[in-house]
Image (tube, helix red, strand yellow):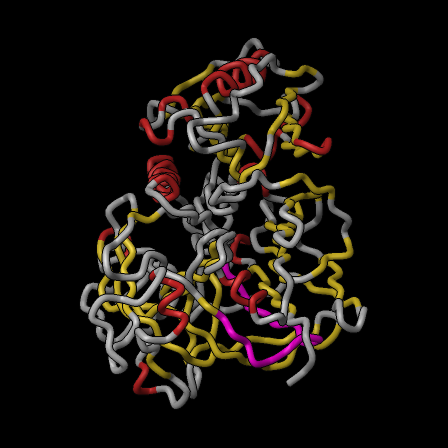
């Protein structure tokens, strides 16, 4: 989810996950990830509320893009199943490609959700039930880094606290702990073995708002892959065991896909530079093409205040465009079929009836970026079904609240069915069209060995309706690239 946090005095600014894996590289670690709303039909109001909450969080103050996927007619995220502690217990955490944190709800929490409608059993972490769990003291270097210095009143026996207040009013508070995270290590082509590593993560003792007990689609916590130094990928890189390179491939047709840390050698990906000094994955968009025609746009249309360029956000469901882009874009799409009877649904969705082939009847939309990188979106991707109609997934950010007005935010509507590669080592991002239900090739940079990383399933604690193919699960592979311990 795109999260931006308000600063909190005395307590931790960022809800962070710091990883210091003791398993080392030629070993490829895997977290399996599952589609959050698989099999659940969602209303358009739910869909918009879902994205609204994400955008409130991204604009509240700090860098926290989001992870996940969901077809607009279903509204979905993905969540990972990970094991924590000794003996290990399973936890379901939302995958967030930009959030800088990992945290799970803890046994002391009174406002935390106890049940979930997602077909999973929630688990509260209890440090006393883990032989490997330890508190992180406030005088430890990790705590200094999170707080930008020593906390007032800190003594050696005090734990390191955290507090995050999100722009939508939700909050999480607790303290940091260190424990063993269990995952699957890639040991060959489409093969894994058990592995584990020590992790510092937030232990949530108090939740409110969307994170509290009223949240029906609750999870155990959040797993972050943000851009800042406190994110999972950054903390892994600090240990020298991985490079800051990861990729995801989200299957917008079947659900599921691939999420991997490491050097992807196949498929090849064209890259565009990230805009410097931006908290999110921002890139320079240069043009928008509808069919064979380019929209006539001013050069600064994709800049809104301090937010430069277009934000690539794999957790937002739809795609939000400035008004001067949205209006001519939708007009050109509709003009392809002059006889369409257009309806406005929920006061903001442009919908119509259409019974022929979408890809034959409507134009492709192509976004152009710096370095001649393009991102093509097909009609069957930007149109989604709703109550017998087809609705346009493009949204007008010009009618959003003041802070979100005219931002360019490209979510799953645009990113699905593509391998998206984040190369933070070279401050670039890129993508290519790909079959996300297949496999990719990832190279171990120490040995040069190339392994296949593929599409995997996990089972939730309770079976969901198997009629919905959206239950397919996302493989999260972590390639640890140093010498074996």
Please tell me which residue is depicted at 35% across the width and 43% down the height of the picture.
61
Relative image position of residue 26 (x, y in whole percent): 71, 75
Magenta-drawn segment: 19-34
The quadrant of the rendering that contains the C terminus is: bottom right
Front-most of residues 214 and 240? 240
Question: In which quadrant of the rendered view does residue 214 lie?
Answer: bottom left
Q: Is residue 31 magenta?
A: yes
Relative image position of residue 474 (x, y in whole percent): 57, 59
Please tell me which residue is depicted at 53% across the width and 33% down the height of the picture.
310
Front-most of residues 467 and 407? 407
**Residue 62 vertical placement versus 208 (above, below):** above
Please tell me which residue is depicted at 49% across the width and 35% down the height of the picture.
409
**Residue 183 vertical placement versus 46 (above, below):** below
Q: Is residue 254 magenta?
A: no
Q: Is residue 466 visible?
A: yes
Total numbered circles: 0
Q: Residue furthest bottom?
A: 131
Question: In which quadrant of the rendered view does residue 46 lie?
Answer: top left
Q: Is residue 465 visible?
A: no
Question: In which quadrant of the rendered view does residue 102 lie?
Answer: bottom left
Relative image position of residue 159 (x, y in whole percent): 28, 76
């Amino acid at each position: 989810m795109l999260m931006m946090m308000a600063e909190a005095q005395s307590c931790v600014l960022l809800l962070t996950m710091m990883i210091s894996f003791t398993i080392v590289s030629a070993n490829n670690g895997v977290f399996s990830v599952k589609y959050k709303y698989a099999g659940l039909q969602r209303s358009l109001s739910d869909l918009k509320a879902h994205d609204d909450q994400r955008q409130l969080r991204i604009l509240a103050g700090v860098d926290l893009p989001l992870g996940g996927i969901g077809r607009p007619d279903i509204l979905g995220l993905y969540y990972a199943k990970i094991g924590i502690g000794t003996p290990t217990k399973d936890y379901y955490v939302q995958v967030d490609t930009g959030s800088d944190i990992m945290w799970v709800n803890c046994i002391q929490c009174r406002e935390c959700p106890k049940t979930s409608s997602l077909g999973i059993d929630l688990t509260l972490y209890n440090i006393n039930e883990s032989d490997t769990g330890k508190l992180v003291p406030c005088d430890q270097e990790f705590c200094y880094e999170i707080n930008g210095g020593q906390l007032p009143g800190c003594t050696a026996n005090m734990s390191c606290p955290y507090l995050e207040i999100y722009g939508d009013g939700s909050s999480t508070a607790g303290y940091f702990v260190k424990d063993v995270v269990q995952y699957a290590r890639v040991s060959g082509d489409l093969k894994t073995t058990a592995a584990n590593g020590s992790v510092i993560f937030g232990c949530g003792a108090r939740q409110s708002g969307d994170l509290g007990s009223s949240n029906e689609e609750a999870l155990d916590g959040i797993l972050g892959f943000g851009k800042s130094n406190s994110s999972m990928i950054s903390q892994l890189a600090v240990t020298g065991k991985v490079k800051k390179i990861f990729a995801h491939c989200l299957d917008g047709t079947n659900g599921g896909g691939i999420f991997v840390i490491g050097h992807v050698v196949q498929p090849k990906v064209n890259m565009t530079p990230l805009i410097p000094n931006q908290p999110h994955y921002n890139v320079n968009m240069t043009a928008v093409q509808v069919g064979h025609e380019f929209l006539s746009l001013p050069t600064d249309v994709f800049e809104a205040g301090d937010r430069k360029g277009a934000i690539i956000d794999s957790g937002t469901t739809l795609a939000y465009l400035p008004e001067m882009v949205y209006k001519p874009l939708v007009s050109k799409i509709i003009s392809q079929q002059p006889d369409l009877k257009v309806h406005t649904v929920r006061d903001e969705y442009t919908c119509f009836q259409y019974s022929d082939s979408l890809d034959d009847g409507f134009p492709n939309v192509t976004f152009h970026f710096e370095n001649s990188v393009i991102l093509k979106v097909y009609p069957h991707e930007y149109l989604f079904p709703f109550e017998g109609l087809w609705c346009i997934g493009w949204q007008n950010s010009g009618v959003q609240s003041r802070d979100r007005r005219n931002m360019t935010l490209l979510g799953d509507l645009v990113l699905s069915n593509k391998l998206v590669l984040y190369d933070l080592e070279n401050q670039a991002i890129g993508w290519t069209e790909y079959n996300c239900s297949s496999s990719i090739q990832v190279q171990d940079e120490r040995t040069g060995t190339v392994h296949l990383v593929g599409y995997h399933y996990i089972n939730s604690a309770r079976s969901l309706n198997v009629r919905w193919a959206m239950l397919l699960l996302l493989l999260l592979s972590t390639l640890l690239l140093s010498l074996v311990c």
